[in-house]
Image (cartoon, coloured by chain):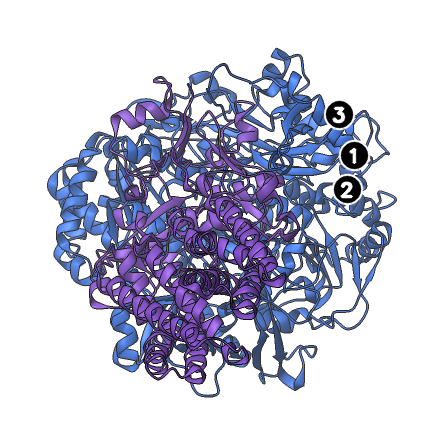
Chain colours: A purple, B blue
Amino acid sequence: MTRYAFLIDHDTCIGCHACTIACKSEHDVPLGVNRTWVKYIEKGEFPDSRRFYSVNRCNHCEDAPCVSICPTNALFSRKDGIVDFNDSNCIGCKSCMNACPYDALYINPETQTAHKCNFCTHRVELSLEPSCVVVCPTQSIIAGDIEDPTSKISQMLGRYDTKVRAPEQGTKPHVFYKGADEAALDPLRTKILEDGMIWADTTKHHPTVPVSTPSIDKNIVARTAYTTNHPMAWKGKVSSYLVTKGIAGGALMVAGLLSLMGHSDERAFVGVYAPTAALFFAAVTGLLLILDLKQPTRFHYIFTRPQWGSWLVKGSFILLAMGLVGSLWWLGGLFDMASLVRAMAIPGIIFGAGTAGYTAWLFAQCEGRDLWQTPLMLPVLLAQAVSAGAAALIIPIAAFDVDPAVENIVLWSLFGGLVAQAVLVAIEVTSHGSVSVEMATAAMMRGEYRGRFWFGVTVGMVGAGVLALIAAAQGNVALGAVAGVLALAGLGAYEDAFVRAGQSVPLS
Amino acid sequence: MSLREEMTTAARADLERLLPGSSLTNYPPIDKWQDWVELDSKDWAHGKKTKRRFSLIPTTCFNCEACCGLLAYVDKDTGEIQKFEGNPHHPASRGRNCAKGPATINQVHDADRILYPLKRAGKRGEGKWERIDWAQALEEIGSRIGKAFREGRRKEVMYHVGRPGDDSYMERVLHAWGLDGHNSHTNICSSGARVGYAAWMGFDRPSGDHANAKVIFLISSHLEAGHYFNPHAQRIIEGKMRGAKVVCVDPRLSNTASMSDYWLPVWPGTEAFLCLAIARQLIVNGTWDRDFVRRWVNWDVFLRETRPDLECTFDNLAPALLDLYADYTPEKAEHMCGIDARKIYEIAEHIGRAVPGRLSTHNWRASAAGNEGGWQTSRTLFFLNVLTGSVGTEGGTSPNGWNKFIPVPPKNPHPHGDWNELTWPKEYPLSHHELSILLPHFLKDGRGKLDTYFTRVYNPIWTNPDGFTWLEALTNEDMVGCHVALTPIWSETAWFADYVLPMGVASERHDVASYETHMGRWIGFRQPVMKVYAEQQGKSVERTYDVNPGEVWEEHEFWIDLSWRIDPDGSLGIREHFESIKQPGTPLSIDEYYAHLFEHSVPGLPEAAAGEGLTPLAYMRKYGAFSLPGNQERVHEKVVTPHELEAAKAVRDAEGVYRVPGTAGMHASIDEVNGHMPFIGDGSVGVDIEGEVKFGFPTPSRKLELFSPTMRDWGWPEYALPTWIPSHVHWEKLNFEAGERILVPTFRLPTLIHTRSAQSKWLAELSHAHPLWIHPSDAEKLGIDVNGLVRVTTQTGYFVIKAWRTEGIRPGVVAASHHMGRWRLDEHTGTPGWTAGVVSLSGPHGGFGSGDASGDGQWHMRQEHGIQTFESGDPDSQRVWWSDAGVHQNLTFPVQPDPISGMHCWLQHVTVSPARPEDRYGDIAVDTGRSMEVFHEWLAKTRPGPGPGGLRRPLHFARPVKPLASAYRV
């Protein structure tokens, strides 16, 4: 068997960037994105200061998270170990960019699809080395078959100690570093200082450690003197999608509860409004997902070219199933078939919860984003769904002539969901995780996203929770509606902080 | 299905791996180059295996001076160049390149490059152009020059070259024109280092065999810049991996310094002090090569001249040197240079262990180009080679001439007999070489005028110090009658031309060049790739502009056609040199020129070509380079046989030097010396070394000259020996409390090359920001905020730049790279938008067209905006994400020519302060009246010739386009 890999020799690399340009030339890589780049860091005080380099690129992982998350088989592992991609399958969902712990992928502005180093497979097929290898003045990039004991790379791996980037991610990376400085390989140990980089502009797309706290700062041993753009992949549409599908799933969950508790005969509210709200927000969810794609017209590839290991695919089918359940429910309500409405209660709860909760597995597939790896993600999503669903039900409830018991259940659901959320978030942000989690949490609570986060907590959880409690205690649906609005607004703010903070930690 | 898709279907079946199994290689074998099939990388990304057929044609990179090999991939279906890789058959670059090599494709395809000859339509610098054809350009320029020649105004025609890229072609043209009209970029680059080397060995450049050294001592940043970046970086790293200690002297933490075992950030200008301290320590330790020094150094002259009290025996050399350098102890060096004395002891020990012969050293720009007296840096550095016997050895440093080969061109004209005092003024008899930076100052001082001035890949307004004085001269039609810019790219200078004539980049022109990259000699052949490709397809190409992009031409053909226009009837005696050898009366073709040159002037090439059944020209077209046979080790030890001495009619003089009558080394009257003099040396052929006649070095003594009689005889007896000269920016002269600092404005990045990388979007993306490096402690002392704007005040003006705090620079020194700060005056045309900001300029009398000579030279430049996205045929121009265009600091530097070498002393004595409220980033203010004053102050430091024999310059010194000896007589 053949297993291709790279070895980067930083005992000899002179940081000349020839590899970067040879790669741009071989693949016609547009401005603003890179398949390979050279990072500079500077350490020490004059006259004992020194600059170190690290050549960064796709690690052609054995367990490649980008391949696992890719919904449409656009990314795939070849038999020879190379992780390659196929533009024709890519829908531009950017999940690979968050799955990869190495910042290796980017959206090509020309093709609007995800690209990365593919080991110059089109050359390797002919026995030609990747173009970066050929150009290197000091022969510091060695490409070859590590299963062939006579290859130069095998011999060097045998002879020298090497390191890999982010081994803790368990991806089994296949770019090996000889002679590299630890900090040059660890993005959390260096920082772009306020006065920028050595000979390139620093933009907001040059990720650096997001916040300064004593515990984060003590970890930093060098400055980042040169690195490249890596814009955030998921932004407002993804955080909005988390809200809308929470509402959709939650509406069915709470209405299912109402149904199970004997209120399936509330035809207008439980039979029609609840599934209408769920279906509407499910539709918005789908729309947001499609609009966030760089290739929106290819959204159907998820169904026609599915990669079943991807939670984007599984989630899409869960969403479809939820839509089916909601539709039957709605038909039951519309045609006054209480038994059908009742029959949909348990499937509604299951697929509502699935809709809200599958994202926990999707985000868990984002190996690059440690904040999202929390085991509390699923309970948080479910709690959010309960409160969001309850909010969607309580806001217009006054327009329906419903049994006060129904109001009561919805109000207590709202309150319960909010309390659970608050407790879970409190546990989450106070528990200790990796440096990366600590950084993301700090970015969320103290950094750029603190406004959104604290709005979410104070208004969306505490404020809305207190109002919900009063409303529930007093049976005051108007106050409940206010609480519901606050809860949804807060949820939007919180999700946005969570999504962005999760991506604020540099991977390279 | 498209054609390409159709081809895809059948593609895989007949595409075989070059190697069995999983093995990989770097290039296809040369026998497949004319018909090489590769898979399309972009289609591969769509899961398609599209075959693309290429012809791989070697050429030579035209970015830095190293002239590395390139391989152009010409797509046989589109007829366009797809990419550039390296040439595995190139002896220096060995198939590898720096970032600038593959970036050549950007220069070829840049959407805004100049594609057609342009003639000025408005006033000079107004930016109005009309497209003309080559015939018109040739006719108008040719007749103008012809008229000047016929009216006896040959001195008014000047060719000023930035990047030569070729070794002999232009020399031939100028000799044929009978003109001392060559001007170069040398004194903004290497004059300092050259004089230091020439003083020792005649040859003015070093050639380190870094790969085999035990200690590699660099006063330069060779792993990112320098002569010759990629080839030398390969070999320095090889040496390092074999265990060599690398020492790097630089006030700034260069990438090279970072890779070194010892980074010595000495005070700028004290490098010679450091070298002498090490030299002294070698003698103290007794770790020097006594045999080598005894045989090859003129120690006897040293003792006789300086120590009449001592008997002239070799044993007295060490004590005399210890007396001479008594003050250069490591402890004193610690104070003077600002580095730990212990490091000096350690390095001296390492160097001691490299005896004999394994110390390679290099200095090119850096200190030698920065400081008054900087030429002593290379001289004292080479002293270490001499002491360790590391001259001409494996692992040592050779004279460059032994590792470089310049073929004699066909129909080589008789040398011209002219002397141009605008380029070789009497004040600088020892300069290496032309006083190019002073041209506008001389013009303003009324020392002459120019009828026709060619700038060729040269951008003095931007690159040279005191650019506004250049601008004043270039816009004054009384000083410069006609300015022709031969350039592959828009530049600040081309904007002020009368004709902008587009000349090719690496794949669009012919040149032959050779450089001292390692021990051995090679020549590289740059060729117009599309011409070669057309000829492979059976088409004949009359002129390269027929196949290059647009009507981009090459100078070689241009000069032939222009010479015919200058002398249409042959009455000036010029045309004959540009006529075909086989068919006189018709123009010489480039093919004929090179066929002849490769057949007759390159030893070993005809045999190698015959071995493959090729003509020498076909061989060079195929391989792009040739490695000359022969061992270049210890050339000085080569025995000169009695037969050779007899053939040369050599006569032994009292010093044991074998001189040849009628040469610079032996003549009663200068008129006896006729014909071409050797480029370096006086024509002597050998020297008696302990009873044997050896080849030696091209110095008057044919030995290495510790004591330089030339320096003594030409007005500088105090510098007859290697010594340290306190720099014009010596730290002890600075008032640090008042905010004075040393500015290093010259450092290079590995990714850019002077002004031509502006046409590469990828290189611009890699590096564009232009901060002023400053140590945090300095920033604190000077009150400069993080990210704060800084005003840097020079003797003639100031510039406003951003600070970058770094531990990578010596406190007391600030630095900004020399690459950035590009500008243009027009929103749409001019220096490429990847690197240039748009500026507004206000000069004396409210404009820049007046050519101010009154002394009222107040100039202001303001950046209207930095780099922005722009409209062009390239979608990437809408993706430009950076904005910093940098600051054109060189405008604010007065000329500071070293009184001996003529080197512009780049380092600036500046005052650094926080910017004032009215300052904006990129602001420049200059008083060119003050520039002229500073010019005169530096001119007053010189000791004008003539020298011995009433000569303008020592005959044995190198000189481009060396005239007849009689022209040396005042």
- The answer to whether residue B196 is above or below residue B878 is above
Q: Is residue B641 visible to the viewer in this orientation of the structure?
A: yes
**Residue toward you, A394 or B830:** A394
Q: Position of residue B322 (x, y in %)?
A: 14, 48
Residue under the image location 56 percent in, 41 percent down: B102
Q: Return the mark for residue B536.
A: 3
Task: Name the mark on residue B560.
Answer: 2
Q: Earlier in the sequence, mark 3 or mark 1?
A: 3
Q: Residue at x 39, y 36 (%)?
A: A61
Quickly name the residue at label 1.
Answer: B588
Q: Is residue A469 left or right of residue B441?
A: left
Residue type marked 3: Gln
Q: Nearer the viewer, mark 3 or mark 1?
A: 3
Residue at position x 31%, y 23% in the image = A155
Q: Which mark is residue B650?
A: none
Q: Residue at the spot x=38%, y=60% of the render?
A: A381
Label 1 close to label 2 by CB (< 8 Å): yes
Separation (CA) of disc 1 from disc 2: 7 Å
